[in-house]
Amino acid sequence: MPIIEVTNLRKTYGEHVAVDDVSFHVEQGEIFGILGTNGAGKTTTVECLQGLRTPDSGTMSVLGLDPGKDHNALRQRLGSQLQESRLPEKLKVQEALDLYASFYANPADTGDLLAKLGLTAQRNKYFGKLSGGQKQRVSIALALVGSPEVAVLDELTTGLDPHARRDTWKLVEGVRDTGVTVLLVTHFMEEAERLCDRLAVFDAGRVVATGTPAELRDRTGKSTLDDAFVTLTGRD
Ligand SMILES: Nc1ncnc2c1ncn2[C@@H]1O[C@H](COP(=O)(O)OP(=O)(O)OP(=O)(O)O)[C@@H](O)[C@H]1O
């Protein structure tokens, strides 16, 4: 049974149709990528899946729960990365981890998590004094602190240098290897190619293709995912 199932999802903001007839499913233990042009409806879709937005129509199931009705139960089992780092400047890294850990019934060991993310030396630093990459890693730690079964990572490596980006990819693969299902929203084709088992390509509120990176390349006759993406989103 899929861990995530989305069927005919539609969400409008006033007159604007942000997500239109979107369907896809995610199997347990996959890294599933949501790729798309700017404003394609990726964030709106993952916000609906987390119960943060109410769709106009369609059905969704995450871990067998309805995100709208079972929001509290789902919150215990789903971890989410903040798209932008929004923590108080004067909160220390360890304090942020401890605070978030207190929201969950079965939190991870925060010392282990900080070590895995290379943040041990920063544990007593104020959040406001961290570099962009360090803030990003804190936001990933916060997504994982509740020992989630599903982790939603939105713009995972935005702002990271190439070394930190590769380290983060390894980390996400390690998370997947522990059985966590990862939903990854990304703009980076290299990241999608390297990390994602399967992808859904979004364009203007719709899913225009789903498949493995190799399937999407084959289907479009292109040798790179970047070119396949451009073809699938109709800008070729
Ligand atoms: N709260 C809102 N009110 C009105 N319109 C919104 C709101 N949030 C998003 N939109 C619009 O809905 C569309 C989809 O936005 P969404 O943020 O889901 O796209 P996205 O694929 O995540 O984009 P990006 O890659 O640029 O982050 C966009 O046209 C956006 O302007």
Image: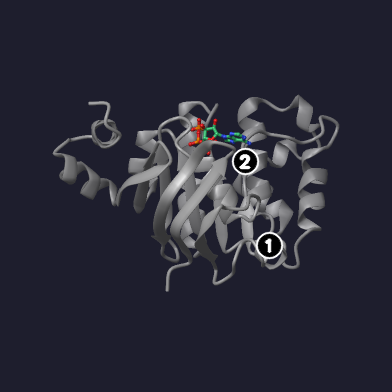
Q: Residue at x 81, y 29 (%)?
A: 89
Mark 1 and mark 2 residues within 8 Å of each other at the beta carbon? no
59 or 95, which is in the foreground? 59
Establish if 63 lies above or below 199. Answer: below
Indicate the position of residue 134 as horizontal and vertical percent values. 65, 32
Going by the numbered disc 2, the residue's amino acid type is Gly
State which tag comes first along the sequence, 1 or 2. 1
Going by the numbered disc 1, the residue's amino acid type is His
The C terminus sits in image quarter: top left
Q: Residue at x 37, y 48 (%)?
A: 200
Indicate the position of residue 33 as horizontal and vertical percent values. 41, 47
Indicate the position of residue 88 as horizontal and vertical percent values. 82, 34
Observer-side mark, 1 or 2, equals 1
- Which of the four quarters of the rendered structure image does ligand 1 lie in? top right
Q: Residues within 10 Å of mark 1 (few under 14, many from 20)?
A: some
Residue 65 appears left or right of 29: right
For residue 118, the mark is: 2
Q: Secondary structure at mark 2?
A: loop
Query: Mark 1 — residue?
Result: 71
Q: Secondary structure at mark 1?
A: helix
